[in-house]
Amino acid sequence: MNFSVALQILISGLNLGCIYAALGLGFFVVYSVTRVFNLAQGEFVMLGGMLTASFYTMGIPLIPSILLAVIITALAGAGLYRFIMYPARKSSGVTKVFLTVGFALAIEGIALRVWGWEFRSLPAFFNSPSIQLWEATIFGQTPWVIGVTLLMVIGLFFFFGRTIQGKALRACADEPLGARMMGISIERMALFSFILAAGLGAVVGALITPLTMTSYSVGWPLTIKGVLAAFVGGITRAEGVILGGLVFGMIEAITAGLIPGGYHNAIAPGILILVLLFRRHGLLVTAGRE
Amino acid sequence: MSRKIIIVLMVAICLIGGLVSCKKPEPVASYKIGTAVAQSGKYAGLGLQSLDGMQLIVDEINKTGGINGIPLELVVYDDKSEATEAALGAKKLIEVDKVHALVEGTVTALGMSVVTVANEAKVPTLILSGTALLDDQLGDWVFRPMGSEVDYILHNLNYLSQDLGISKYASLLENSGYGQGGKVFLPQLSPSYNMTIVVEQYFDPGASDLTPQLTNIKNSEAQAIFIWGSSPTASMAVKQAREMGILLPIIATPPQVSPGMVEAFGQYYEMAPSLVALTCKIDIWQQLPEDDPDKAMYREFNQLFTERYDHPPAMWNVLGAQLIMFIEDGLKRAGADPANLEEARGKLRDAFETTKELDLLAAVYTMSPEDHYGGVRNKMVLVTFKDGEMVYLP
């Protein structure tokens, strides 16, 4: 393997890793507060991408387009909690997961009616040109993906670690009864976590649309990838999700570049199985400290 | 009291309704064609286009008095882009709707799922499928009046070797059913043009970054790239290659030059040396020379289609339409009585099998008992891109 291939794989892996980490963060936010695995997260990403692309093609500048998309998607997140998850808050965990699946299917169906089946795209943010780095290429959108993911990560750490609101969110997950006794409304926190996750998802959707294009049907495959990333690293800790995403992206880039014969798409899920066999709670989380 | 009156009224309405419906005249016998197409799910784009084409031709046939005086009826189910749903839909169409013929009109993966059902129930069936890999599995009752990847490859390899003088090329193939055709047939057919594949790379539909694969191609001795896939990723690959400064000639498959993909990636398709792809004549029919025997046929189809749907037809519209045209030809020759279901199905099957030199939009078909895919003389053409337009490459 020569230098240019290695460098290109590294860049590609970082790009993919940030996408998966950002996808995984949405799962983390909802799971850490409600212990619900929200399998509609990919649909928020789809909504974010489709809405941004729609507003942008209507002539609205990029940033307001993204903001509008984030607001509408966050409302969808609020709707999911208020009208589905809240009434079912006493149901079992499995029921809740399937409710999110039902919501995902409904969103996909509505999106097909609203937008049709065509793929939509966006140019790289602010038409950033691609950059040549020695023999390797960095696409114009890649620095945006990496930068915005980094901002989201820093923002989340600050929020959960330093703000009262964030600490209250964590308290709900760690010690629901105690939190309630301290006067924290678990329902309000859960609602907030769905809104936050939907908003983050929408940002991710806007970020990846210039790279992958988007359509009404992209949500579910993204959900799967986000789930894998979150599980590899450990869903209960933000560091775990980010590490999982990066590991996953790097594996995908390495195998795509080096494994002949098209077998690379079987390798990443294979690694997930191995990780879960040997470290039941993910790479970063030790058993018992769930 | 008032509730009683309401109940009495409702019963009365039901009774009167029943009497009225009894008096309805016997329905006119029609030839029923059942179709399961993808109206939702990941293949909905293609399925809906195909359905528009089918419906157009069915209505046109009925406007001119049907077939031998008998109207056509199209019964439609959504297979939701799932093979199981397609098979269930086919079963329902056969057993409940009692159709005379069946069309599975979206893609190979869905079409193949009805093959067993159709053969077991003995219903003449057409599938929309572009691969020659499955031609030995069609059985006695299923027909595939379509082109196949073998046709693309011969056209494209001929162009690469004869027009460009290229002998070494790279293949970049989609990890999908569609990509399988390239994986199997490219290595098989390349030697006959004295060409070798120096590097073979794969990508997943939905992947966002193909730079590792493209770097491998860039570092190889390849003089051209054959990109093969049906997802937008296959089109995006062209963009990424050009952004990486790879300026080798690129050859593409028909889905990559569908209208949406051209709109999204046209500027990269145009970058010299501009992309060359095989596609249906419908995309460039205006540019065909006047002496091209197909030009009139396409002009007529284009006019019919545009009048009804307010936009010009695309490839899958043509494919859907021509499946109905194929059935029309069979029904005309079969002369079957629609009331006698089993006999009509048998006669139609025999008629399909004796299809001879049937000149349709996308190809000329001749069927035989040994060959249910049609001894195709394909009408696909090579195109390239210039000034925002798709240009016919004679």
Image (cartoon, rainbow, N blue to C red):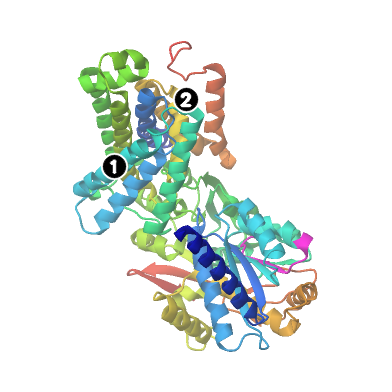
Query: Could you say which is closer to the camera, residue B151 or residue A148?
Result: A148
Which label sits on residue B123?
Answer: none
The chain ID associated with circle 1 is A
Looking at the image, can residue B46 be seen?
no
Earlier residue among tags 1 and 2:
1
Name the kind of residue labelled 1 in the image: Leu
Q: Which residues are magenta?
A: B119-131
Task: Answer few, some or many: residues within 10 Å of disc 1's Cα (few below 14, many 20 plus, some between 14 and 19).
Answer: some
Q: How many marks?
A: 2
Q: Secondary structure at mark 2?
A: helix
Could you say which quadrant of the image residue A116 lies in?
Answer: bottom left
Please report contact status of discs 1 and 2: CB closer than 8 Å, yes or no: no
Which label sits on residue A232?
Answer: 2
Mark 1–mark 2 Cα distance, whole angstroms, equals 30 Å
x, y percent for residue A183: 25, 17
Q: Is residue B120 magenta?
A: yes
Q: Is residue A115 left or right of residue B36?
A: left
Name the kind of residue labelled 2 in the image: Val
Q: Is residue B190 left or right of residue A111?
A: right
x, y percent for residue B130: 61, 62
Q: Is residue B197 left or right of residue A72?
A: right
x, y percent for residue A24: 39, 31
Which label sits on residue A75?
Answer: 1
Could you say which quadrant of the image residue B373 lies in?
Answer: bottom right
